[in-house]
Image: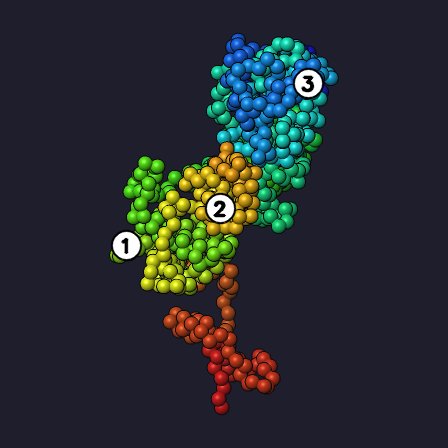
Amino acid sequence: MPPINEEGPPVAAGRLLLQVPDRTRLVRVNQGSKAERARQSIGAGVAGHDFEHTAAQLPETKELPAQATDAPELVFARLAPLIAATGSMWLIDPATNERVGRARPLSKKLPDLPAAVTFWVRQTRTTDKLVFDLDAKDLGPTAVLRDFVWLHALLVEAGAEIVSDHNPGTGGRHLIVPLSPGETLHKAGLESVMLLLAARLPTLDRAPMDNDAIGSIVPPGSRTRQGGHRILDGTLADAVAVLTERRVEFGLVARLRLLLGDSLTNSNASAAGRSRSRTPETGSEQRYERGERPIDVWEGEGEQQRLRPSWRGKSAFPIASEAFATTGAMVPGRYDSASEWRQNVLIAAALRGMTLAEVRTRMGSDWLGMAETYARYKADYEIDRALNRDWSHACDWVQSHLGDFFRCATHSEREQHTPPLTGGHEKSAASPPTLSATPHADWLARATAWTHATWPGQNRRWQVVAVLQALAYAAYVAGRMAPDGTPCVEVGVRSLGLHAGLMAHETVASVLAEVREIPGSPVFRTRRAAGTLADEYSLVTARRAENLDELTDPVPLDRISVGPVHDAWLVLGLHKRAIYELITRTGLTAAADVIAATHVASSTGHDVLAALARDGLITRGRGTVAPGPHSLDDIADRHNLHAERAIRLGEVKQQRAEWRTWLEIRFGMVEDPTADTELSDIPAAPWDSDHTLNELIWASQLATGPPEPRYPGLDDSPPDPDDPDALALELLHDQLGAVLLV
């Protein structure tokens, strides 16, 4: 391997080896104004540099990973099943490099021919691994080795854990990088990062990652076309731990794109693999205006504002970003200008929970490269203004890309409070639940049957069932019971929407308004919402519409769940939920039985089964169905619904705070900040100082509506502003509806 020039740019253009600066040699900045400190740091230089933006280098890898000493048969038997997404493999003809016949079951016994396994899930076209194939066919093993070192260092900088192997006959290498637990990506979400890597790695073969149908890789230990075996780098125990424990932070691909200089310069690239952008440029998907900081995501105020702990990245600060911040050195092949590198540093700081105050402190100590980028400003206030602007832009970018980098509360954690159906014990096949298990389960079972009888064959029933389940869950969490044992709950439509699979609160309100007016309804409103108090409901037993003296027969308890509706149904569609839950909860395996039990048309039922199979939630055979390899949590993670829930929670909290503030201003508990504080010469009206009279006037106006004109049929011209009597009569008419009789 050619040596690395420690003072200049890398010898090989494709190499991205960054020299970490010696912190002990950094020049400390003298005291004085911020502008003066920046200028002094430029004049002093850092570690012998004159602060011209030189190419940075990553630390050179002194030696490659040690080769595994385990037998190839054992390596293949342990790793091939962990890499494969399906239980099949293809054998390859060494002479033609073509597949031999059809796919066959994956065996732990090492085949006599080279074997390839796919890491793509065929039903969903998703993968939970990144696979990089460095091919030595065209440029030779030296180029492969150079690209391997470059890519390995980049992946480690992004926080990845890697399993790698090589073909001793050709020098080709593979890198297999697992994503975080539960994280899966489509091909569209990987295209941008693969294009960026292919432009920098001439030996990278994109075929395995581009073919999301049968893209495959030859696992470690397999036989090669040259007659040997692929040799694992490192120990087998370490490789197994990487593939099984998945100690990788969520958002690896997003961090790679940021390290490669794509996320800041190409904001529209590959939206399919990202969460929806929340910045004003995204049109109909806009959620936040620039400068907005939701209280569920950010904490603190002013220069002390930072991301809350649940949204902070735990990976180390990127080496290249740290190098630019400290020395001003720019790694080639990433960002083109110092301003882009500056934003990269600020984004990296914001993602890891730093505040603007901490950034200022670092710029006054060891981040001399950052300080140099602001040295063109002459005055302190200009530096402050520019830094505040850049930090605001960085926080806006972080806010709009949170779903790419972080996964907040998981869906499984939210479901841990679901009550058991049988007196404090988990449901089991040996002890099936009884109807008297809990009042909430009893109510929901009858309410579900009542819904299907009230809206037979209509899509509306799926929304109604979701809202009723959310009501049952809210009542269970509240724990309130009437003296006769009827569950009661005080809950608003926004909270119910969060329990009903992120259903819009307008939809929840329309469902409740319709349900509670139907005879025999299981929902009875005992109190209307007022002030900060929400509607209060009593969960009464549903009755037959044709005979209100008879109770509705319940559905079997294994078909209902007193818990929140999973967020995944927001994207899957509530009309698929009943069929999926019958398959996963009741053990029904015949497709005809499942369709009949959900009371849907045969064609509709088969369409739903096909859609669930495409998403990997179920598997289909000849007239049979079974739970699939993927869960609802996987669907929610794939669509970043954890970020959507966090956004909805922030909106609800903000709306509640605004409502409480309005109420306090309305009833005089606090001063209205928008009110005119200047004294007026106009005397106050009697109702301004008499609270009782003021409330009576409000009630009268709301009950009677706007007053009729004073003189119907005549010109209702405004009063003369110089006539005090006319002004007084006009005021009485507007406020009280008074009419002049004489």
Residue 300 position, x and y percent, is 47, 42
CB under 8 Å between callouts 3 and 1?
no
Which residue position holds label 1? 485
Q: Earlier in the sequence, mark 3 or mark 2?
A: 3
Hey, which quadrant is residue 268 in on the image?
Answer: top right
Residue 642 point in image, percent of width and height: 50, 41
Kindly identify the residue that appears in the image at 36 percent across and 52 percent down. 554
Q: Is residue 683 above or below residue 382?
A: below
Total marks placed: 3
Q: Residue at x 71, y 22 (%)?
A: 202
Name the residue tied to disc 3: 97
Q: How far is mark 3 from mark 1, CA to CA?
A: 73 Å
- From this viewpoint, which residue is outermost toward the bottom? 742
Between circles 3 and 1, the one closer to the viewer is 3
Identify residue type, mark 2: Ile
Of tags 1 and 2, which is closer to the observer?
Answer: 2
Q: Is residue 537 visible?
A: no
Q: Quadrant of the N terminus?
A: top right
Give above or below for 542 relative to 390: below
For the residue pair 189 and 91, the one nearer the viewer reads as 91
Residue 536 lies, with reference to residue 6, above or below; the image says below
Q: Which mark is residue 595?
A: 2
Work out how far the residue at label 3 is from the one at label 2, CA to CA, in angstroms.
Answer: 46 Å
Amino acid at the residue labelled 3: Asn
Judging depth in this view, the residue of 362 and 190 nearest the camera is 190
Residue 290 position within the rendered picture, expressed as x and y whole percent measured from the top left: 59, 47
Cα distance, mark 1 to mark 2?
36 Å
Sequence order check, earlier mark of 1 and 2: 1
* Residue sitting at the far right: 138
